[in-house]
Image (tube, grey):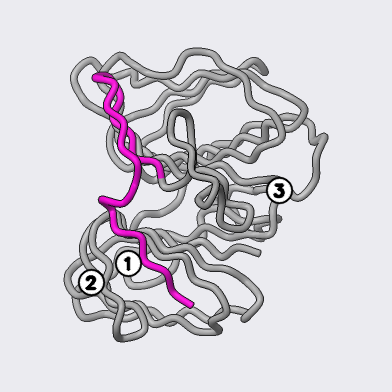
């Protein structure tokens, strides 16, 4: 089953310095029918103004993945980690038993656009940790590039405490990607830019998403040059 969620169906919040779109219940947006998809609990599509951001705040028992799409994001946490990320980098934080962190846009004149995702961990009571990884953007072209995975076998892939894989892809017009999946798993598809057709009939445009269950195969065809994120979930 493929359920499409158009970009304009998301909850939007504009705080001046922060513009957000929530794919799942978060903050002032509450919908008991839209709390999560498998272990995917939060997907926020944020734009943060220059020299603004989220001050120190706590998290616990959550795996937090941040993908910067444009601009720069600076992370600091209570364990002493400091890092700045742009497109081509992944931030993964395991909140575990508890951690404080801040996320700021360090630029004087450029907005930062980012996706932040929260996943339920596969076990509680983990020791808090932070990881920053880098991936080769060119490897996204016309293929699925894993950027987050449980127990990755190679460098450039962030480790997450959950049985899932996050892929990024840049698909040229007319190109197609086939994705095989166990029928008892879930797939979440999020279009970053462009337009794709899924399994020959479902058209998704920029910032549309699809929640997919009980399917063993997906065919994703680019109607024009397109970039998307695919998450394989239990």
Q: Is residue 16 magenta?
A: yes
Q: Residue at the location (63% across, 79% down)? A: 182
Residue 45 figure quarter: top left
Few, some or many C-alpha atoms within 10 Å of disc 1 (few <14, some 14-19, many ≥20)?
some
Foreground label between 1 and 3: 3
Percent across and percent down for residue 56 are 53, 13
Residue identifier under label 2:
172
Do callouts 1 and 3 mark residues in contact (Cβ within 8 Å)?
A: no
Q: Is residue 7 magenta?
A: yes
Q: Looking at this view, name the residue that lies furthest to the front.
A: 32
For marks 1 and 3, the one nearer the N-term is 1
Of the pair 133 and 167, the residue shown nearer to us: 167
Few, some or many C-alpha atoms within 10 Å of disc 3 (few <14, some 14-19, many ≥20)?
some
Residue identifier under label 1:
141
Q: CA distance from mark 2 to mark 3?
A: 32 Å
User: Regarding mark 2 in the picture, which secondary structure is present there?
Assistant: loop
Do callouts 1 and 2 mark residues in contact (Cβ within 8 Å)?
A: yes
Foreground label between 2 and 3: 3
Q: CA distance from mark 1 to mark 3?
A: 27 Å
Image quadrant where one finds the C terminus = bottom right
Quick check: can you spot residue 67? yes
Q: Residue at the location (75% across, 50% down)? A: 122
Do callouts 2 and 3 mark residues in contact (Cβ within 8 Å)?
A: no
Percent across and percent down for residue 216 are 55, 84
Q: Residue at the location (28% across, 77% down)? A: 197
Question: How many numbered markers are drawn?
Answer: 3
For marks 1 and 2, the one nearer the N-term is 1
Q: Which residues are magenta?
A: 1-22
Q: Residue at the location (72% across, 24% down)? A: 98
Residue identifier under label 3:
161
Residue 10 falls left or right of residue 54: left
When the figure is inspected, residue 207 is found, relative to residue 220, above or below; the finding is above
């Amino acid at each position: 089953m493929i359920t499409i969620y158009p970009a304009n169906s998301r909850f939007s919040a504009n705080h001046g310095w922060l513009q957000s779109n929530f794919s799942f219940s978060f903050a002032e947006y509450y919908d008991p029918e839209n709390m999560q998809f498998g272990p995917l609990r939060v997907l926020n599509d944020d734009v943060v103004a220059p020299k603004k951001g989220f001050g120190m705040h706590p998290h616990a028992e959550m795996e937090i993945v941040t993908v910067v799409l444009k601009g720069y994001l600076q992370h600091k946490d209570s364990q002493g980690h400091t890092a700045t990320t742009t497109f081509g980098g992944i931030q993964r934080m395991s909140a575990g038993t508890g951690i404080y962190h801040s996320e700021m846009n360090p630029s004087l004149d450029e907005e930062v656009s980012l996706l932040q995702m929260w996943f339920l961990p596969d076990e509680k009571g983990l020791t808090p940790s932070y990881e920053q990884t880098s991936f080769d953007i060119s490897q996204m072209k016309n293929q699925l590039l894993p950027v987050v995975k449980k127990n990755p076998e190679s460098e450039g892939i962030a480790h997450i405490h959950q049985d899932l894989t996050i892929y990024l892809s840049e698909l040229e017009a007319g190109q197609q990607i086939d994705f095989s999946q166990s029928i008892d798993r879930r797939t979440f598809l999020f279009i970053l830019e462009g337009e794709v057709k899924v399994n020959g009939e479902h058209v998704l445009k920029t910032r549309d998403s699809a929640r997919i269950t009980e399917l063993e195969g997906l065919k994703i065809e680019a109607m024009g040059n397109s970039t998307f994120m695919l998450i394989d979930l239990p």
